[in-house]
Amino acid sequence: MGRRSRALKAAGLTLAAALVLGTGTAGWAYWHLNDNITSVDIDSALGDNRPARAVTTPTPSGSASASPLPTEAVNILVLGSDSRSGEENQELGGGDSGGARSDTAMVVHIDAGRTGATVVSIPRDTLVTRPSCPLSSGGSTALAHGAMFNTAYAVGGPVCAVKTVESITNVRMDHYIEVDFSGFAKLVNALGGVTVTTDEDIDDDDSHLHLAAGTHHLNGKRALALARTRHGIGDGSDLGRIGLQQKLVKALLEQIASTDLLTSPTKLYAVADAATGSLTTDTGLNSLAELTRLAESLKGLAAENVSTVTLPVVTAPSDPNRVVADEPEASDLWKSLT
């Protein structure tokens, strides 16, 4: 969820959101939560010119249940975005509708069997070849060499973000989840805050966060500030921010695991409302039923079995303020997710 998120975040934040939904709700509450979710038909937009899907292992004859939970490996592109304009996002630092950005990007790979996962963060300043992407209004974006990774979302939204990730990784993104500024903050607040330990002092006027090194319990606004912080740590690059975002992913998963939402229907609803209200997904995850199904398949996935890594990068020869993938390490990492 870097800025949010995106929030998965962050993200990763989304894994957290999906896990929360595993309990479900009923009646009008179910309808409301279902109606919260925004979706984009990425599969139709991109067609068949994409990396192959992971091979699904058939269920042995006679052992299938009426509705078996998925167990195959799955890759989810999680973005933190300030694309949704509005007063709440503006107060939290979000852009207007004409300045959409995705400064946090994570590829979440869930292993076959759903007992382990790897979260790969892609630095927003990575220079890539951005492919031509179809636009919902017709036409397409131009092929761009040496473009910053996060421009894909800016010029072509979720469809171009997915196509760009698939182009540079040769890995099929089975799903897409986007979390916005205010939604991430609301989710953290609904969970009662999140506890994070920082290894160094943070003094960042841009994100309005000032923390001494140590353990802190943060509300939604401060957790979002932590996800957005870059100038107050390390060398001020995006790589330092990614480290904080990965800490947040683990902390949120641990917070959810330690919170007994089933004993408090009010809190459960608040968490589910915040989670669904912050989401934009592909059409394969655009219902509470599908999100719940994903969450139920992840019940055996413990926080300690979620690994967080950053795409290996080196300083770009053309610009000391940008990075490029470090090969062959980067390609080896992506191959491990297929």
Image (spheres, grey):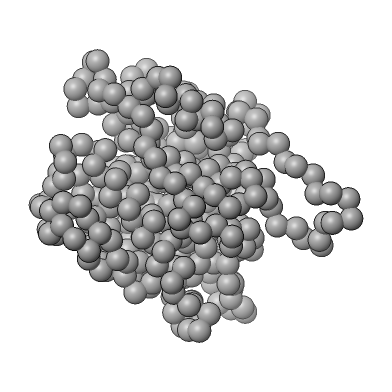
User: Horizontal and vertical percent for residue 155?
Assistant: 38, 33
Q: Is residue 66 above or below residue 247?
A: below
| Residue occupying image coordinates x 65% and y 50% | 113
Extreme residue in the right direction: 62
Q: Is residue 166 above or below residue 63?
A: above
Q: Toward which corner of the image does residue 271 lie, by quadrant?
A: bottom left
Left/right placement of residue 161 relative to residue 74 reads left
Q: Is residue 175 above or below residue 299?
A: above
Q: Nearer the viewer, residue 313 or 113?
A: 113
Left/right placement of residue 191 relative to residue 169 reads left
| Residue occupying image coordinates x 54% and y 72% | 32
Residue 203 visible in the shown view = yes
Q: Nearer the viewer, residue 242 or 92?
A: 242
Residue 3 visible in the shown view = no
Left/right placement of residue 46 relative to residue 86 reads right
User: Horizontal and vertical percent for residue 297?
Assistant: 63, 58
Q: Nearer the viewer, residue 17 or 153?
A: 17
| Residue occupying image coordinates x 32% and y 50% | 245
| Residue occupying image coordinates x 13% and y 53% | 201
User: Horizontal and vertical percent for residue 329?
Assistant: 42, 24
Q: Quadrant of the C terminus?
A: top right
Q: Nearer the viewer, residue 227 or 276?
A: 227
User: Horizontal and vertical percent for residue 309?
Assistant: 39, 40
Q: Toward which corner of the image does residue 35 lie, by quadrant?
A: bottom right
Extreme residue in the top direction: 317
Q: How many marks?
A: 0
